[in-house]
Amino acid sequence: MASDDEPDDGDDLDPVGPARPLLVAAARLADRIAGVGGDPDGAADVLACAARLTRKVRGLGEVADFRLDRALDEAENETAPKDRLAALRDGIDSLLGEVEEGEELPAEPLPQAQTLIGMAIGIGAPAYNTGDKQGCYEVYAATAGMVLGIPELPEEAAAKLRDGLEKSDALDDPEAQAWAMRHAFDAVGEMGPGGAGLAPREVKAYLAMAVGVGAPAFNLGDHRGCYEVYAAAARLLVNSQAVPDAVKDPLRAALEKASTIPGVTRQVLVLREAFDALLTDSVEPDKDEDGKGDPDAKDDGGGT
């Protein structure tokens, strides 16, 4: 149980350190699950899983650890889903402060669903690989329920998600439940959305999100969880009809190379090298009316 005496990390330090991208992604996913999905209990499950995972990240400040411990403790003592969600959100918001709005989700139903699924895998896979199999399953199940509410979601994708939920609901082992949902997610991720292609900015935003979630897992020591996040993102882009070949080809080559080398750490580095190349040089920037590159475009890469 959390103490009432809060430690002091100093005024100049980010209390969540390398875990910031993970908590930001979890907060955004939870907001959508609670709002669009109408599932405050599922949203609380996502935040609780992210909070437990964050507390395992090396470099986390004492203030963040204290507040997350207290938020988890307070949420556990709440019975109403909205109160449980509020306790967790208050604790996380107190650490994140003001957060810039993220990239908008794709407008087309299937790419939107695939992006949300990618966010869920980015939280659930590292949680699973650090022992929180129940938390992983809860993140996946809450996300699937919310995705099913996307208007005009292709029936094939909806059927895969419903099948995953039904299979997992019939199981009583969190590990098996998590895998039932993950198989459904992977099946949806492999579907080609058709329609208009993704803009270079959207591709870069998705890769940067994967790096933002995978890198803290790697630095925590969960190299397998980091690889799961990177590989899921790469496979989603490779299998999407909306992604240009200039993006697909290096990602496909990196996935094939990673599958042939021993050691998950080396596999992570192969995928990260491909991501960094696309984030910096290989994806042509959006052009303005004068045909010039976007002056505000930034390199979203970073150290693994």
Image: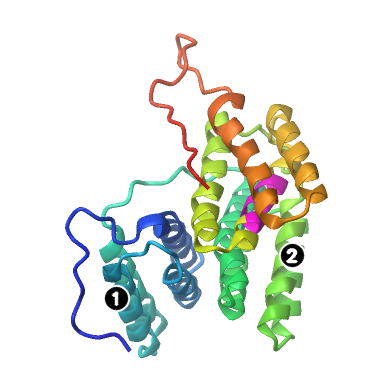
Which residue sits furthest top? 290
Q: Amino acid at mark 2?
A: Ala
Quarter occupied by the N terminus: bottom left
Q: Whole-percent x and y of residue 302?
A: 48, 41
Q: In the rendered image, is residue 295 in sight?
A: yes
Q: Nearer the viewer, mark 2 or mark 1?
A: 1
Residue hosting label 2: 184
Residue 142 colored magenta?
no
Give the magenta part as a residue range.
Answer: 227-236
The crowd level at tag 2 (other Cα within 10 Å; few <14, some 14-19, many 20+) is many
**Does 285 appear above or below 179?**
above
Q: CA distance from mark 2 to mark 1?
A: 36 Å
Q: In the rendered image, is residue 106 in sight?
A: no
Residue hosting label 1: 66
Identify the residue at horizontal 74%, vertical 64% (top origin): 184
In the rendered view, how is the structure colored? rainbow
Q: Amino acid at mark 1?
A: Phe
